[in-house]
Amino acid sequence: MAAEMADQPEVLARLVDRAPADTATVRAVVPRPLAGIVFLARGSSDNAAVFGRYLAELCAARPAGLAAPSLYTRYHAEVDWRGYLMVALSQSGATPEIISTCQAVRAAGATVIGITNEPRSALAGAVDLLLATDAGVERAVPATKTVTAQFAVLVTVATALGTGPAIADVLAGLPGAVAATLGDPRPARDLAERWHTIDRLVVAGRGLGYAAALETALKVAETTGILAEGMSAADLYHGPIAAVYAGAPVLLVSGGGPGDADLAGLRQLLDGRHAETASLPALPAAAEPVQVITAVVRGQQLAHALALARDSDPDAPAHLTKVTETT
C-alpha cells in the first residue's frame, strides 16, 4: 500500500499530460442534446463517482446522479436512456453488475463511458468509450493510486461537458500537490497514534469534499476494522449528531471550496458536545478538485498509519479480496 501510494504523483502526471486529448475524445461522444449524466460504480469507485456527480452537474449544467445497479440486475427495469451519458467506474473492469448494467442502459439508448485500470477487461466491450487510468498493477487490497487516478480522469470528463476553465488550469499542480502531501506524513501518523484504540469514527465533508470524506472512511474501515462512516456535514447535523457524544472521534475533511464554510460551524457544535474533533492539513491555493484529491491522499496516510499502529496488515486486511464480484 505504501509503495502504491508513492506511485501517485507519477500516475497523475501522466493523466494530466493526457487530459487535453481525453477531453476532446469525451466531447466527441457526448449525446447532443445532453439530458443528464449518471455515474455507476461500487466501493472506492463509488466514492469517486460522488466526486464526479458534483463536478458534472456544476460543469454541464445538467442533472447528474448515481445509478442503482440492482434496478437492472434484480428488478430488470425498462428505462428510456436516450440522451443520457453514463460514466461507469471499475478499477478491475470485471465487476459483473457494472458490466451488465452498462449493457442494459446502452441498449436502452445511453452513451456509456468506462473508466478502468484494466483496458482489456470485460468493461471495454460494454461501453462506447474507455478511458484507462494507467496506474499500473495495484497489489494491495486497499485501492490507492487507482482511486486518485479515477478522480483525476473524472475532472477531465466533467470539464469536457462544459465551457468552463481549461483542463490544464483545473489540474495545474496536481502531481506536485500530491507529492508534497506524501512528503508530509507526520500529521497522519500523529493522529493515528492518538486514535489507535478507537472503535468507531465519523468522517465528514461537504460539497466536493464529501467524496474525500467517504473515501477516507472506507480506507480506515477496510485497513483497520474500525467502524468508520463517511457522511455529509449537512447530514451529520440531523439524526446522526445524536451518536456523537463526549470523546467521540470525528474527522473533518476540507475540500478547499464553498462547502468548507459549513465545517467551521460543525466544529463549533462538536466542540460544544465535547467530541474529539480533528482535521488533517490541506495545501492552500490549489483548485478545489486538486485539494479534494490531496484530501483523499491524506485519508490514505491516516488509514495506513492507523493499521500499523494497531498491528494490522494494511496490504491484506482480513476477509477482503482485491476484486469483489457483486452481481
Image (spheres, rainbow, N blue to C red):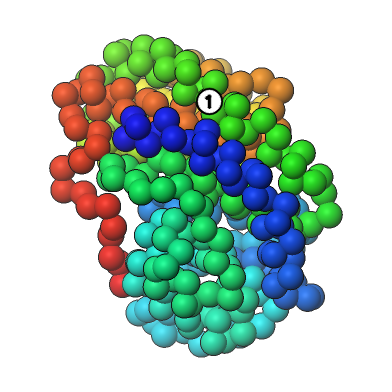
Q: How many marks?
A: 1
Left or right position of 270 against 4 = right
Q: How busy is the neighbourhood of tag 1: few (under 14 within 10 Å), some, or many (20 plus)?
A: some
In the rendered image, the vertical position of residue 3 relative to residue 102, given as above or below: above
Q: Position of residue 130 (x, y in %)?
A: 55, 66
Q: Residue at x 20, y 40 (%)?
A: 317
Nearest the viewer among 187 and 203 is: 187
Answer above or below: position of 299 versus 63: above
- Quarter in which the C terminus is drawn: bottom left
Q: Residue at x 64, y 43 (%)?
A: 16
Left or right: residue 88 versus residue 75 is: right
- The image shows residue 187 at horizontal and vertical percentages of 43, 14
Q: Is residue 42 above or below residue 286?
A: below
Image-quadrant location for residue 221: top left
Task: Look at 35% across and 67% down and name the residue there.
Answer: 94
Quarter holding the N terminus is top left
Which residue does the image show at 32% across and 18% down from the upper left? 192
Observer able to see residue 98:
no
Q: Which residue is mark 1?
A: 179
Q: Position of residue 304 (x, y in %)?
A: 31, 28
> 31 or 194: which is nearer to us?
31
Callout 1 secondary element: helix
Residue 316 is situated, as x and y percent measured from the top left of the image, at 20, 41
Q: In this rendering, is residue 289 above or below 66?
A: above
Q: Is residue 140 left or right of residue 263?
A: left
**Residue 187 shows in this picture:** yes
Q: Quadrant of residue 97?
A: bottom left
- Work out which residue is located at the far right of the displayed protein and give it: 163
Image quarter of residue 240: top left
Q: Amino acid at mark 1?
A: Ala
Q: Nearer the viewer, residue 56 or 116?
A: 116
Residue 172 or residue 279, whichever sits in front: 172
